[in-house]
Image (cartoon, rainbow, N blue to C red):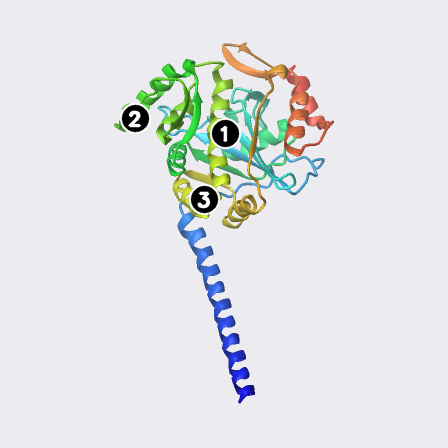
């Protein structure tokens, strides 16, 4: 009798185990379906060419992934297709870091097949594909994918994380409220104005206005800094919260405003890497560096010219790859000499 009871118990355990495995498989399949079709279903996925001006000399660490990030605002009257914001987003699994590099939109560069011009014009001339080629050629990068986000998404994301804490300067208040007023006139909504400086929690609409301030402080320099501050604040809140539910909510809110060359598997893989690698911080920087650039008007147009593009590229590779004494390729050296 004892043997029979033991045998029955073993069979019962086996059935329960197989049932458990079956449930996991079903959940896994349904979970993948939900992510790909419900949460990521509204994302506009675009295929781009493999010919992206990536030098064969750039055999970089595969644990460091660079993606081009473009910000556009289709609500602007007379929108011309230029990228209002250009950044390089870096997932550094080697050093467990997220990194964000802003490239000033007036930066004077060589645009492949076109001419020397502002880098944000590359997006207007040939969309994200030409913009990636331009970044790769001028900065010795190996970017293969991009994400373009409509600025309206920023408002949704900030609200989804419960606002962002920003230390607003006294010199920013007037311009902030001017931008808020223009937003309200466009949307017919009423947004709370800022009346005092200091650390305060901004709503999505307020954070968007803060990111769009252009005529306060050091012009576009501080503007890109504000954008990085807002993004860094969002990322840190999500990473430190560690909530999958919040992350999924962000994806769902963001998806209608995204265009990307990444496929669903890549997006899920990168998101999983961030949450499983213990990354808790984001580092940021801007190019060109003040000491390696000069702004001025040439033929009636303002440009920000890298005084030495090669030095800027060396700095960028130190920041992204944490390698010292990087020597730029001959292509970058040639462009650098031409600009000077």
- Secondary structure at badge 2 equals loop
Q: CA distance from mark 2 to mark 1?
A: 32 Å
Q: Residue furthest front?
A: 2
Q: Residue at horizontal 66%, vertical 34%?
A: 321
Nearer to the camera, 23 or 313 = 23
- Tell how many labels: 3
Residue 254 x, y percent position in the rendering: 41, 40
Give neighbour class at mark 1: few <14, some 14-19, many 20+ (Cα, 10 Å).
Answer: many
**What residue sits right under mark 1 in the picture?**
123
Q: Quadrant of residue 196?
A: top left
Residue 192 in which image quadrant: top left
Whole-angstrom CA distance, mark 2 to mark 3, is 26 Å
Position above or below: 296 against 235: above
Dot 2, crowdedness within 10 Å: few (<14), some or many (≥20)?
some
For image coordinates 63% across by 15% down, the residue present is 291
- Name the mark on residue 135: none
Of the two numbered discs 2 and 1 on the same chain, state the one appearing first in sequence: 1
Tell me whether circle 2 and circle 3 mark residues in contact (CB < 8 Å): no
288 relative position to 43: left or right: right
Q: Is residue 85 visible?
A: no
With respect to residue 334, does 92 lie above or below? below
Q: Residue 66: image x %, image y %? A: 59, 37
Q: Tell me how far mark 1 sits from mark 3, CA to CA.
A: 29 Å
Q: Position of residue 337 (x, y in %)?
A: 68, 18
- Most extreme residue toward the left is 188
The residue under label 2 is: 191
Quadrant in the picture for residue 90: top right
Residue 25 against residue 208 in the figure, above or below: below
Q: Position of residue 97 (x, y in %)?
A: 59, 37
Report the side of 72 relative to 88 (left or right): left
């Amino acid at each position: 009798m004892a043997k029979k009871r033991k045998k029955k118990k073993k069979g019962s355990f086996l059935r329960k185990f197989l049932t458990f495995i079956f449930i996991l498989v079903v959940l896994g399949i349904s979970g993948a379906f939900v992510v790909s079709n419900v949460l990521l279903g509204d994302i506009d996925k675009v295929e781009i060419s493999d010919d992206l001006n990536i030098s064969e000399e750039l055999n970089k660490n595969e644990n460091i992934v660079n993606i081009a990030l473009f910000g556009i605002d289709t609500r602007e009257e007379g929108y011309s297709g230029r990228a209002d914001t250009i950044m390089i987003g870096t997932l550094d699994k080697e050093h467990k870091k997220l990194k964000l590099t802003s490239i000033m939109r007036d930066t004077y560069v060589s645009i492949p097949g076109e001419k020397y011009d502002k880098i944000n014009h590359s997006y207007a001339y040939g969309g994200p594909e030409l913009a990636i080629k331009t970044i790769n050629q001028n900065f010795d990068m190996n970017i293969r994918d991009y994400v373009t986000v409509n600025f309206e998404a920023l408002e949704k994301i900030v609200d989804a994380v419960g606002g962002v804490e920003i230390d607003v300067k006294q010199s920013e208040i007037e311009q902030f409220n001017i931008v808020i007023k223009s937003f309200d006139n466009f949307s017919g909504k009423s947004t709370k104005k800022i009346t005092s400086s200091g650390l305060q929690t901004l709503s999505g609409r307020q954070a968007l206005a803060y990111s769009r301030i252009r005529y306060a402080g050091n012009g576009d320099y501080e503007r890109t800094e504000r954008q990085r501050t807002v993004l860094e604040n969002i990322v840190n809140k999500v990473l430190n919260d560690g909530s999958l539910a919040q992350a999924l909510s962000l994806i769902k809110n963001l998806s209608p405003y995204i265009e990307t060359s990444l496929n669903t598997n890549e997006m899920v893989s990168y998101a999983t890497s961030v949450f499983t690698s213990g990354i808790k911080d984001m580092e940021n920087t801007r190019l060109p560096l003040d000491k390696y650039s000069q702004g001025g008007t040439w033929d009636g147009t303002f440009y920000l010219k890298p005084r030495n593009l090669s030095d800027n590229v060396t700095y960028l590779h130190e920041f992204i790859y944490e390698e010292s004494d990087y020597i730029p390729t001959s292509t970058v050296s040639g462009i650098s000499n031409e600009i000077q």
